[in-house]
Image (cartoon, rainbow, N blue to C red):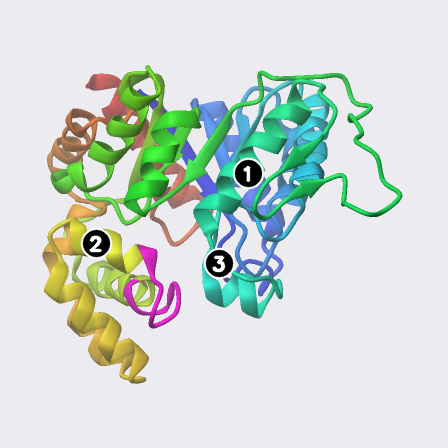
Amino acid sequence: MEVSIGIGGAASGRDRTFDRDIEFVVEAERLGVDTVWSAEAWGHDAIAPLAYIAAKTSRIKLGTGIMQISARTPSMTAMTALTMAALSNDRFILGLGASGPQVVEGLQGRSFKAPLTRMRETVEIIRMAFKGEKLAFSGKLHELPLPGGEGKALRLSQPPNDQIPIYLATLGPKALEFTGEKADGWLGTSFTPDHADAHLDYIKRGAISAGRELGEIDIQAGGTVAFIEDDSALIESLKAGMAFTLGAMGSAKTNFYNEAYRRGGYEDTAREVQALWIAGKRAEAAQKVPELLIRQTNLIGDEATVRERLKVYRDAGVTTFRLGPYGRTLEERLDTLGRTLDLIKSL
């Protein structure tokens, strides 16, 4: 079993805490963590932090969790990935995601129409670039070179590197199947190992259709990990985050996170929390989040409880634990991370 951590998030950039993030990653590498993922929403971009971390580390793999496919052209994404792989001595993992309509249309000014088609075409163009091929492509959303203009099909001047892994953060059934067909790994969200089939069955179906096995795909999932006796305050704070996911991560019409939790056994909860959030009743929305959902999406309790939850994730098919170690200080977070790594080794 491997272990990954994350930095950044939707609120990244609000406070300039990057020095603490770097210290956390450097110490996590020393403890044995395998991968660090940088988030990209509407705060920090995914690449700049990783480029700096690459200079401060030597072993840990560096992944974008995720680069938004609507925020860059596929060719620029490929150029950036090749550059990151070169400067990090091939430690880079390209993580891609479609984001959601509020960000894509509100922030990027692009249509969110046909996100899976955009993902398919983006991955195909990037793979062409990684192989050193000329970028001549005709799809529904991308056409290279632009017809009727003065452009011509170009190949990137960087040396080919088709060994850069591509991981996808997908949630809808068809997108999960595509992950099984084409991706090296899956960045799991809205996932409970107790209802793993709501995601993994689709990934497996896609893998089989492409002549692959589910075991060829790195399944990354996890949550907050905390060794704590009285967890009531932590549970309440995590309820607020879950309410945000169910109610705000997307529009009232399109929320893939909400739909995934509905498939995973929380149909009524997901709908009710979303309705309250949209109505502006955020505190009530958080209170409607059941404690069981928080416990199933995180690893909270005494050491024995956390160890049992790790087993549930492992037995469900997760191959890399993605951990968010809880702590009020950097030292506490690192202590939690170290204890969890010891438990994982004991499995």
Residue 94 or 146: which is nearer the viewer?
Answer: 146
Q: Which quadrant of the figure contains the N terminus?
A: top left
Can residue 239 be seen at all in this image of the molecule?
yes
Per the image, label 1 sits on a secondary structure element best described as helix
Q: Which residue is mark 2?
A: 261
Quarter holding the C terminus? top left
- In terms of secondary structure, where does tag 3 sit? loop
Q: Residue at x 58, y 16 (%)?
A: 163
In this figure, which residue is indicated by the disc labeled 3? Answer: 113
Query: CA gap, disc 1 to disc 2?
Result: 27 Å
Amino acid on which disc 1 is placed: Glu
Q: Secondary structure at mark 2?
A: helix
Among numbered discs 1 and 3, the one appearing first in the sequence = 3
Amino acid residing under circle 2 = Tyr
Upstream in sequence: badge 2 or badge 3: 3
Seen at 35% across and 20% down, the residue is 210
Q: Position of residue 147 (x, y in %)?
A: 77, 45
Q: Which residues are magenta?
A: 246-256
Q: Which residue is at 31% across, 47% downward?
A: 172
Kindly identify which numbered label has been placed on residue 121.
1
Task: Determine the CA span between mark 2 and mark 3.
Answer: 23 Å
